[in-house]
Amino acid sequence: MAYTYSQVTASNGVVLHTIKTSPNSVYMKALPGGSSLANQSTDGINGSFFDFSSGALLTIAVNNDVPVGGSQGSYGSGYENAKYARGTLVWDSREGEFSVQVVSSAASLAVVNRHQYWAQGGISMGLNNESGWAAQADKENMPNRTGSAQRAGLVYNTSKNIWLVVTNTNCTAAQFRSAIKEKVGSGTLVNGIFLDGSGSAQMRAGTVKAAGDGRKVFSMVALR
């Protein structure tokens, strides 16, 4: 797999671990039974919000319209953003385009070919919406937006690169977003989503790892 790992520190003190790669090197992967990413052999970062007791995936995680955790109609499979319409990052490989679409189900995603895309649900980051991103994140029921926590996210730029980003620095969503805008993409970023955070904010990039609190997570945004 071809990717570039970097560690950078923003002016607000947030330390970002980033993986830059092609969207065609990315796929959604279930971790049945749960696993910390430090124990995985696959590189990538944590993915969906999940139910701690059951491991059910609470946000979309699909490859070519197939949810990673079960069938399209089953709860926790990764085919739906449970309870709320939420910002979902979509790579339409047929069209060669990224988008962030606010939907409740993968069935509602606008793609050219339903067998040629991947999608990961999260919370809209609104990189092009300084005045309204926080209100939109609240509308999508973002957990702990203003609290101090570890964070994870996905962002893309005008050249169709994607960055997988994790910080194990405790920070607000605004501080994480600001650090990304300052240090990632050299001013070319278009948009992105927040992923599950807190102790779930984990990355594996070869021997480099951002550990979160080492808890088990149940899906990841993985690299081929």
Image (spheres, helix red, strand yellow):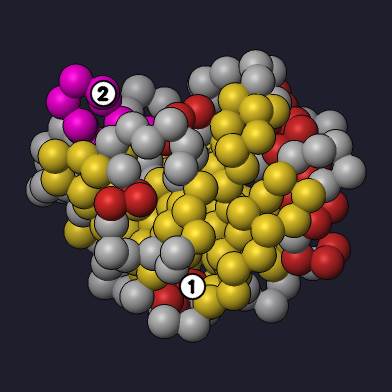
Q: Which residues are magenta?
A: 49-57
- Residue 39 visible to an observer of this rendering: yes
| Mark 1 or mark 2, whichever is nearer to me | 2
Q: Nearer the viewer, residue 206 or 26?
A: 206
**Kind of residue at disc 2:** Phe
Give the SS element for disc 2.
loop
Q: Nearer the viewer, residue 11 or 189?
A: 11
Q: Main secondary structure of the magenta part?
A: loop
Q: Which mark is residue 23?
A: 1
Q: Quarter holding the N terminus?
A: bottom left
Left or right of residue 205: residue 69: left
- What's the CA distance linking mark 1 and mark 2? 29 Å
Q: Earlier in the sequence, mark 1 or mark 2?
A: 1
Left or right of residue 138: residue 2: left
Q: Position of residue 202 (x, y in %)?
A: 45, 45
* Residue bearing mark 2: 52
| Residue 130, quarter of picture | top right
Crowd band around label 1 with a 10 angstrom C-alpha radius: few (<14), some (14–19), many (20+): many
